[in-house]
Image (cartoon, grey):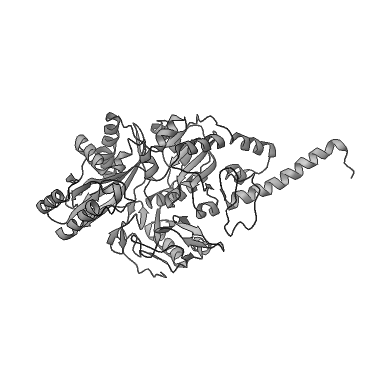
Amino acid sequence: MHLSAPNRPTLAVATIACVLLKMACISHNLGASMKLGHLRVSNQRQFPNKISQLFFLQTKTFKSSKTFNPHNNFHRLNRHKSTISNNISPNNPEERVTVLVIGGGGREHSLCYALKRSHSCDAVFCAPGNPGISNSGDATCIQDLDVSDSEAVIGFCRKWGVGLVVVGPEAPLVAGLTNDLLKAGIHAFGPSSEAAALEGSKNFMKSICDKYGIPTAKYATFTDPSAAKTYIISQGAPIVVKADGLAAGKGVIVATSLHEAFEAVDSILISGSFGTAGSSIIIEEFLEGEEASFFALVDGENALPLESAQDHKRVGDGDTGPNTGGMGAYCPAPVLTPKLQDLVMESIILPTVKGMDKEGCRFVGVLYAGLMIEKKSGLPKLIEYNVRFGDPECQVLMVRLESDLAQVLLAACKGELNSVSLDWSPGSAMVVVMASNGYPGSYLKGSKIQNLEEAEVAAPGVKIFHAGTGVDAEGNYVATGGRVLGVTAKGKDLEEARERAYRAVEEIRWEGGFYRKDIGWRALPLKQVSSKS
């Protein structure tokens, strides 16, 4: 058939729409990485060729729409080039938001994963991200956005219409990134630098506990090694020595003898093993009992509890060896009964929220309370506060969360948590952390990791979160960090979640890594878990 001239543009538009639809689907399913100033597709195995620079956004529309309207998508891209209105209400799921996640570890991967599933989320960026986040399609990774430069982050948000920034790690919070974002009129989930002192200074946290009657371990603060040792002698061992500042989860030494305690004091205060984080130390009484993690979202006045979780801090089976950032976790934690959770809210979380407000440090974000359920009393005491999601606890929380995370976090930013309730999938979840040999001490980088695709389909409900991975010249995943992978699984109960997680772990081929074989040992009878590490 001969087409008249007036119909040719229609055919051209239809052809372009067809091509763009294919490109959008490829971009959405495979994920992408991006550098500022130009869009660059990640050089993973999944990307042998450059994909159109136009469709890099991981949008819900590309996945769920049955039809494709090129005009609407050009409109969406144009909308991402200017600041958009952020008056989003948790009661209006039709309003949309674009989210930027700050960080590049396993916690941030799991947050991207949950945000991608949020119905109200148009697109998810992650800076700097990592290859696993990009390749999974859970977010578009912005590799060279300097997250320590507030102006650069603000500029990116304005250019791409980011309506919510979720700050994952503690360092940008303590440095004041949230303060700067709020001044620029951008919603940011995470406390101000003043409120982040709850984690940035253990002495500050302890002073809040003292002032507002929050149950915690007896303590004293020192900058002089001799005075610290005199106090240790008066208290006896076991005793706990902590660096006051941020030490990546490694600044706590549980000393079983006076000699170990003295060595810890010298290491921190004299040798400077934790740098400026160890300019002062906390000497704390040893609490005997079972540790648990309790999380609550806070909007300045209201607090909304999340599911409970239990981390495994020690590097070795049976909770042996030095402390780490966390070798595995499960959710929920049976030790935190509903009665205990109510008690934690009443005696620890809410007094902290009210106390911070009175101190002029209004807290907005997530309060992560590290707890000890004392053996002698059965009551919870606060060990420490973190002011962000825990890692690896965030992984098990995010795979079970069924609510729209973007809307929940926006509600917290806007002081509307009293109108929010959370939905969780039934059953349990577990994450097993795979780490580089030598961690938490020195470790080699660059060891090859294989069979991740096979591991993720080894059992139902498995999701692998990347924490410290890179790629080599051949496109293979390699280890670049201490904690490298978080192999996570859901199940109808904790036993099934554990069986699925370890089945996936055993599929992974990585000679340079190791993992604990007993995650969940406090809650379940142990079964022998084989290891290929």
Residue 461 located left or right of residue 273: right
Q: Position of residue 227 (x, y in %)?
A: 13, 48
Q: Residue furthest left?
A: 234
Considering depth in this image, is 171 or 417 the residue closer to the camera?
A: 171
Residue at left 63%, top 45%?
A: 55
Considering depth in this image, is 327 or 297 the residue closer to the camera?
A: 327
Q: Is residue 148 visible?
A: yes
Residue at left 43%, top 38%?
A: 409
Residue 247 located left or right of residue 73: left
On the rendered image, what quadrant is the N terminus found in? top right
Q: Position of residue 273 (x, y in %)?
A: 28, 54
The image shows residue 148, relative to residue 449, as above or below, that is above
Q: Residue furthest right?
A: 2
Q: Position of residue 180 (x, y in %)?
A: 42, 33
Residue 1 located left or right of residue 161: right
Considering depth in this image, is 132 or 266 the residue closer to the camera?
A: 266
Q: How many numbered discs, if any?
A: 0
Residue at left 62%, top 38%?
A: 77
Quarter of the image holding residue 196? Answer: top left
Q: Position of residue 298 (x, y in %)?
A: 36, 36
The image shows residue 299, relative to residue 328, as above or below, that is above
On the rendered image, what quadrant is the C terminus found in? bottom left
